[in-house]
Amino acid sequence: PTVLGELALKWLEVIQTGLPVAALSATVGSFRLSPAERRILNEVYLPWAVRVGRNAEYLMNVYYEDEFDTDIDELRKRLRIETVPSVDTI
């Protein structure tokens, strides 16, 4: 877990819920990033969050406790969650 990763998830939440507090958190949270991290957020993770937020099942309705024994790849496929892009260097 990193600030960068949490911000990517926060943007996914913004796309799915449209909650102003999520948008505020995602915007203000990015002020803590270095220029290199901000570039990665804008070029890699933000586009990922938008794609997943628009295409995935509504994730607030998932009972994750019921999915603990589900294979992660199977769960991603069922919920239409694209794997997060890998970033080797920051």
Image (cartoon, grey):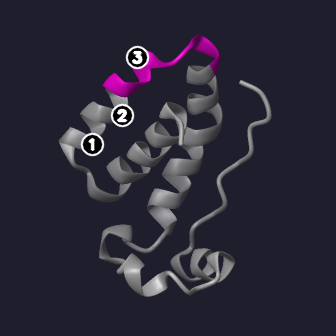
Labels 2 and 1 touching (C-beta < 8 A): yes
As helix, strand or loop, the secondary structure at mark 3 comes to: helix
Please give the residue where the numbered disc 3 appears in the rendered image: 31
* Location of residue 42 in the rendering, given as x and y in whole percent from the top left corner: 57, 30
Q: Is residue 41 above or below residue 36?
A: below
As helix, strand or loop, the secondary structure at mark 2 comes to: helix
Q: CA distance from mark 2 to mark 1?
A: 6 Å
Please state the extent of the stretch shown in magenta in the rendering. 28-36
Please give the residue where the numbered disc 1 appears in the rendered image: 22
Please give the residue where the numbered disc 2 appears in the rendered image: 26
Query: Residue type at mark 3?
Result: Phe
The tag on residue 40 is none
**Horizontal side, residue 63 vs residue 68: left or right:** left
* Location of residue 49 in the rendering, given as x and y in whole percent from the top left corner: 51, 49
Q: How many numbered marks does the figure carry? A: 3
Query: Residue type at mark 1?
Result: Ala
Q: CA distance from mark 3 to mark 1?
A: 15 Å
Magenta span: predominant SS is: helix
Magenta segment includes 84: no
Query: Residue type at mark 2?
Result: Ala
